[in-house]
Amino acid sequence: MRNTLITLLVALCSHTYSQEFNITGTWLGTSTFLKDHTQLRYELTQKGKEITGYVFAKNLSKNDSIKSLIEGSIVNGKITITGKEIIYRTGISCMAKNTLEYSLNNGKETLTGKWKGDMKLNTCPPFVSGTVTLFKEEEVASTPIVMQAEDIPTKVIAEDDGVGKVLVNELGKRKYFALIIGINQYEDEGIDDLDNPINDAEQLAGVLTYHYSFDQENVTVLENPKREDIIYELDKLAGVVTEKDNLLIFYAGHGIWNEQLNQGYWLPSDASLKSKSYWLSNSTLRDYVGGIKSKHTLLISDACFSGGILKERAVFDNSRAILEVYKLPSRKAMTSGTLKTVPDESVFIKYLLKNLVSNQAPLISADQLFRQFKVAVINNSPNGQVPQYGPISQAGDEGGDFIFLKRQ
């Protein structure tokens, strides 16, 4: 679970199956290198222990792309795939050696592992490496980041929608910042490790930079950060984000609720059950959200008991309404549940990403986005979690809302 009651944390386990499997088919996903994310499409054919096929890769923040012929094998359950021949290439893309593991979790087939260069001159440079996460094509709904922009035509502002055109033009001049946090591993042995938050964080970063107006240099992804790492990045944002800019903060990891103090907390990787000194409280987050002088800040928390930071919610739509709420500063939060536990394999992030990618509108407010997937989360969560959306109390919200601008 993303958390339990005060001192007891329970994580759902991911089971890796060692029996025979066949990976023939199309696999979609992403790879990472430092803070860059690359969109992947693998078309694989397995015959016995041998693998052949093609890989298509496109960098999410640049114009680098490649299609290459690949070959590989399966030995003792380990999958090795290496680029053999480049079919076409733009930019500085390169072939790599992939070492992957197959797993089947709740009917979802996954390939995860690492890519790296080696001493061969036709692959990426030696010692360069990153992560790889792939899902069987029928599971694309849970990993929408890999959907091509051309697969989902973006609607354009109607010719007579002068307000919409003005707002699109104005938002195009503003910066969108994002701080995205995923925590899988905890130093305290009493706190269960998680399987999915880092992958969820990386996928959200890819969606925002590929489909929306978040430039790569303004997006920071923290993997297994300590409390001081999170505070450092929040302090840095406070120094660069202006009153014209927009800020999105995302957290996936353990959350906890202290009944005595009536306070919710995020648990950084160095959190200890023996002391709250390394916990990150809702009140501290509220102070930062209120103190960072953005035009709009949206906090998205996929953790247990995350609903404790909220007050209430509002509803609106259409271009003129969006313009009106854009004029007013906002400090909003979108959470995966109320004051209860939520699963490690997040239904919330699945439908959040799916709706961000499938959105065709040039402009969509956080409230509109939330209303599109709230019911799907309720209907498909194993414990009836109810996601929440609304203003963060005492943080400077004046009734506006965060507006996502689709890349044109």
Image (tube, grey):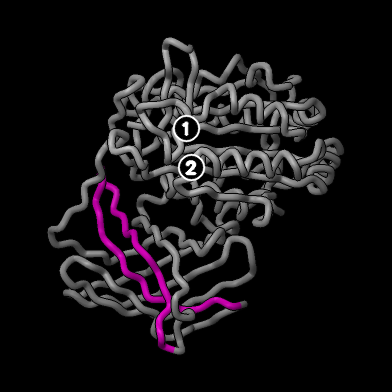
Q: Is residue 159 left or right of residue 216?
A: right
Give the number of the disc on residue 226: 2
The residue to which callout 1 is attached is 278
Q: Is residue 175 left or right of residue 209?
A: right
Q: Amino acid at mark 2?
A: Lys
Marks 2 & 1, CB-CB < 8 Å contact: yes
In the visual, does 236 lie left or right of 198? right
Q: Main secondary structure of the magenta part?
A: strand
Instruction: Decide: is 317 above or below 226.
Output: above
Badge 2 element: loop
Residue 190, percent across and down? Answer: 28, 33
Range covered by the magenta-colored residues: 92-120
Residue shown at 40% from the left, 75% from the top = 54
- Tell me, yes or no, if residue 141 can be seen here: no
Q: Quarter of the image for the C terminus: give it.
A: bottom right
Q: How many discs appear? A: 2
Residue 187 inside the magenta-drawn segment: no
Q: Is 101 included in the stretch rendered in magenta?
A: yes
Q: Residues within 10 Å of mark 2 (few under 14, many from 20)?
A: many
